[in-house]
Image (cartoon, helix red, strand yellow):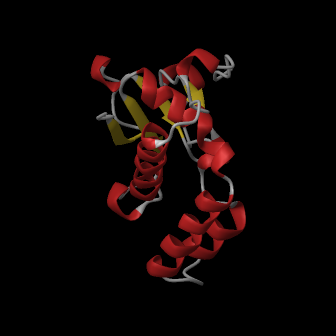
Amino acid sequence: MGYEIKLKRVYAAAESSDGARVLVDRLWPRGKPRDALALTDWYRQAAPSSALRRAYHSEAISEASFNTRYRLELKEAPELLVPLLRHARQGTLTLLTATRQLEHSHLPLLRERLLQMLDEEDRSDQELASSPCLMDGHAAE
């Protein structure tokens, strides 16, 4: 099954085609009131750990090292991605970040992992952990 997971800066205008809009940054974007973002959710758990984010932004590690370490973080805690998988199963999912350069952010890696997990679940004979009917009502406040 094909899933649409878009990547967008949180500062870009919301569009009706965005579907579920989920901010996946640890920190709230500067200068943006909550009601201005039209968020479905703010899901910090899918963002890189604070230590990894700080190391990357201070240039203590390379982009390649960041990518490797973030992929490992995602692989070690697949249960944290279940809410995002559920949004993707319901329709378009737009992942949002305040990062200026989307292609150098964590979002492409997160999308890659989500699509991989969706594919693995779809191929499995087991019940879907990310079934939309199991949505827990977790929403941005």
Taking the spot 54% from the left edge, 81% from the top edge, the residue there is: 59
Q: Quadrant of the N terminus?
A: top left
Q: Is residue 15 above or below residue 130?
A: above
Q: Position of residue 27 (x, y in %)?
A: 64, 47
Residue at image x 44%, y 31%?
88
Which residue lies at the image location 52% right of the left edge and 37% below the top edge?
Answer: 125
Residue 8, visible in the rendered structure: yes
Who is closer to the viewer here, 130 or 109?
130
Residue 82 spot, x, y in % from top left: 61, 37
- Count of all numbered marks drawn on residues in the image: 0
Relative vertical location of residue 58 with respect to residue 20 in this rendering, above or below: below
Q: Is residue 22 left or right of residue 47?
A: left
Question: 78 or 68, which lies in front?
Answer: 78
Q: Residue at x 28, y 21 (%)?
A: 17
**Picture coordinates of residue 116, whole percent (x, y):** 43, 51
Residue 27 visible at all:
no
- The quadrant holding residue 92 is top left
Please tell me in which quadrant of the rendered image residue 5 appears: top left
Q: Position of residue 51 (x, y in %)?
A: 71, 68
Looking at the rendering, in which quadrant would you find the C terminus?
Answer: top right
